[in-house]
C-alpha cells in the first residue's frame, strides 16, 4: 500500500536536521536550491521514503543541492537550476511504472558525465551501497558507502582528490555556467589516457538525457 504524505512527512524533520549539521561547517561550497511545494509533495509520494531519512528530507526540503559551483549535482525535487526531480529523472531509466522498484536509483551526477546510484541488485553485489559510473572506466564501481555517508562526503569530503585528474585550470568559472541538464562530452573521451600530453582533449556541453544512455547501456 502506498504511503500518504501524512505518513511520509516527519514533523521533527530529523533527516533534514542531520543534513543541515553536515552543511554547517561544510568544507565544500554548496547551494541549496529552493523547493517548489507541489513538486516536492509529488516527488516524495513517488519516492515513498520518509523525511526522517536524509534522502526523503533532501527530496522534500530542496530542489536539489549543487556542490562546488555545480560540479556535483545532488537530486532533490527539482528546481530552475536543476530541473530534474529524483523520481522524475529515474522514470524510464530505472523503472517504468509508478510504484515499481528498479534495480538501482540515480541520486546524483557530475559535469564529467559520472553518475551516482543506490544499488538495489542490478549494479553489483553490494546492495544499498552507492555505485559510481566512472567516465574514465565506463564501468559502475562501488564507493562502499550508503546514501547518508555519500551526502556527508559531498559536503565535507576531499572532492579535489576524487577528481584530481579531471579538474582543469578555470574549471570553477566554467562549471558555474553549466545548466543542471547538461554534462561535458570529451573528445577523446575520458577512458582514453592522455599519455605524455600527446593528445589534447576537447570538451563541449551536451544534454544529460543524451549522455546518460552510455551509463545505462553499460549495465
Image: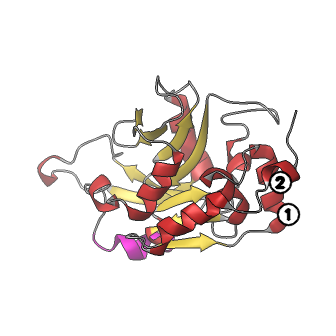
Cα–Cα span, label 1 and label 2: 6 Å
| Residue 134, image x, y percentages | 39, 41
Frontmost residue, 153 versus 34 = 153
On screen, residue 207 versus residue 68, left or right, reads: right
Secondary element at image label 1: helix
State the image quarter where residue 165 is shown: bottom left
Q: Is residue 99 above or below residue 88?
A: above
Which of 110 and 107 lies nearest the eye of the viewer?
107
Q: Which residues are magenta?
A: 169-178
Q: Residue at x 60, y 65 (%)?
A: 17
Colouring mode (rainbow / by chain / secondary structure / one colour): secondary structure
Residue 174: say if magenta.
yes
x and y percentages locating residue 159 in the rendered image: 34, 59
Q: Position of residue 204 (x, y in %)?
A: 45, 59
Q: Quadrant of the N terminus?
A: top right
Residue 42 bears which disc, if any? 2
Is 131 located above or below residue 148 in the figure? above
Which residue is depicted at the point 41% across and 35% down?
Answer: 142
* Circles 1 and 2: CB atoms closer than 8 Å: yes
Q: Secondary structure at mark 2?
A: helix
Q: Residues within 10 Å of mark 1 (few under 14, many from 20)?
A: few
Amino acid at each position: 500500500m502506498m504511503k500518504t504524505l501524512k505518513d511520509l512527512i516527519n514533523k521533527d524533520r530529523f533527516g533534514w536536521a542531520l543534513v543541515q549539521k553536515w552543511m554547517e561547517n561544510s568544507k565544500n561550497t554548496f547551494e541549496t536550491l529552493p523547493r517548489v511545494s507541489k513538486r516536492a509533495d509529488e516527488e516524495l509520494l513517488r519516492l515513498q521514503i520518509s523525511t526522517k531519512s536524509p534522502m526523503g528530507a533532501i527530496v522534500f526540503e530542496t530542489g536539489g543541492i549543487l556542490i562546488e559551483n555545480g560540479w556535483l549535482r545532488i537530486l532533490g525535487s527539482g528546481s530552475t537550476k536543476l530541473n530534474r526531480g529524483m523520481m522524475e529523472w529515474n522514470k524510464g531509466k530505472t523503472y517504468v511504472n509508478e510504484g515499481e522498484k528498479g534495480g538501482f536509483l540515480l541520486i546524483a551526477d557530475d559535469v564529467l558525465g559520472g553518475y551516482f546510484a543506490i544499488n538495489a541488485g542490478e549494479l553489483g553485489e553490494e546492495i544499498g551501497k552507492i555505485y559510481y559510473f566512472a567516465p574514465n572506466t565506463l564501468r559502475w564501481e562501488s564507493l562502499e558507502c550508503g546514501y547518508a555517508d555519500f551526502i556527508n562526503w559531498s559536503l565535507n569530503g576531499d572532492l579535489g582528490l576524487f577528481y584530481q585528474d579531471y579538474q582543469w585550470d578555470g574549471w570553477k568559472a566554467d562549471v558555474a555556467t553549466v545548466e543542471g541538464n547538461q554534462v561535458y562530452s570529451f573528445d577523446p573521451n575520458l577512458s582514453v589516457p592522455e599519455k605524455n600530453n600527446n593528445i589534447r582533449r576537447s570538451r563541449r556541453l551536451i544534454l544529460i538525457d543524451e549522455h546518460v544512455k552510455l551509463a545505462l547501456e553499460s549495465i
